[in-house]
Each structure stands twice: as structure tokens, then as C-alpha cells.
Amino acid sequence: MRIVVLNGVNLDVVGRRDPDVYGGITISELETQIYEWASELDCTVRCRQTNSEGEFVDWCHDALDWADGVILNPGAWSHYSWAIHDAVELFAVPVVEVHLSDVNAREKWRRFSVLEGLVTARVIGKGPEGYREALELLLAKSS
């Protein structure tokens, strides 16, 4: 199974953000961990991160042609980017939305996701382990 992991805005500096909220892991450490989990689970993963909303949308479009599953952490874009909503709406494969923090226990504006109703599952508040759970969910969907 080929899975794309798309991380969005501010995840490049996640290691500098509040460790009680985000876990203290850098994007490089997170991606290394995701690649290790993918190897253990016998799937292929491609991780990408951008602070450009247009580039994130382009990567969604690119993945339409090859990905068997999608893991998205758009960051704050989850709460307002209808452009990302429209790009995700095109997927015919399972999509899992992941957030390191428990967005439902934070500010009111973080509780809404433009991806609601489009994604197969949401994994929130589990820190980096949420990505492993997302991989497992996608693999279960493919069998």
C-alpha cells in the first residue's frame, strides 16, 4: 500500500511549540518515526510538509494519481481552508485526518474541521502515535 502523509502549516516548527500540547518532537523526528512504522507495517510512505496552502493542494492533486491512502495534518488550515476541503473531496481512497493535540479540548475555533464528512477517520490528541494509528487504519481499510 502506498500512503502519502501531508503535514501542513507550522508543523515544520512543531518541535519548538508547547511540548505539553504537541509532544516536543521535531518534524524530522516525526517523519523518521513514520517511515519506521511504515517499514514495520509493510507499506510505502511519502512524507511532505509545507507552509504553503497552494503547495498542499498541489500535493493532494499529485497523490490522486498514485496514493492508496492519505494521512493529513493540515494544521490550522483544518479549521478554515475550503481550498483544502475541495482538494480532499477528490480522493477516492481512504483519508485519515490527524492532529497531534486534542483539538476538541482546545479553543472553540479549533473544534471545527472543514474535512468533516470527507475523511474516513480522525485521530486526535494522541501525539506522534496518532500517525501510527492512522497507518493501521488505512491498512485495515485496504484488506
Image (tube, grey):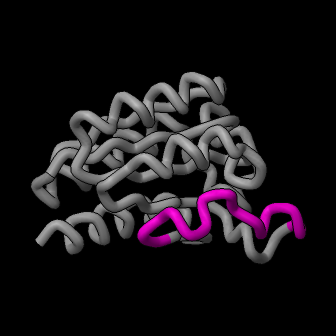
Task: Tell me where residue 134 sits by quadrant.
Answer: bottom left
**Residue 138 image point, x, y percent:** 28, 65
Residue 99 rendering spot, x and y as whole percentages: 59, 60
First to last magenta residue range: 107-121
**Front residue of this view, candidates 63 and 31:** 63
Residue at 40% across / 40% down in the picture?
31
| Dominant secondary structure (helix, strand or loop) of the stretch shown in magenta | loop
Which residue shows up at 77% across the image and 49% down it? 80
Q: Quadrant of the C terminus?
A: bottom left
Rendering coords of residue 128 (x, y %):
48, 58
Q: Nearer the viewer, residue 85 or 136?
A: 85
Residue 18 vs residue 34, the one in the foreground: 34
Q: Position of residue 117 (x, y in %)?
A: 56, 69
Tell which residue pokes out farthest to the right in this image: 108
Q: Is residue 81 magenta?
A: no
Number of callouts: 0
Question: In the image, what residue occupies the spot 71% across and 44% down?
Answer: 81
Q: Is residue 104 left or right of residue 108?
A: left
Above or below, 110 against 102 in this view is above
Tell me the residue at 45%/45% (across/down).
30
Specify whether 117 is left or right of 68. right
Q: On the image, which quarter does residue 107 sit in? A: bottom right
Decide whether residue 117 is among the magenta residues.
yes
- 79 relative to 59, above or below: below
Compared across the picture, whether 1 is left or right of 21 comes to left
Locate residue 128 relative to residue 11 in the image: left or right.
Answer: left
**Above or below 38: residue 31:** above
- Which sits in the foreground, 71 or 128? 71
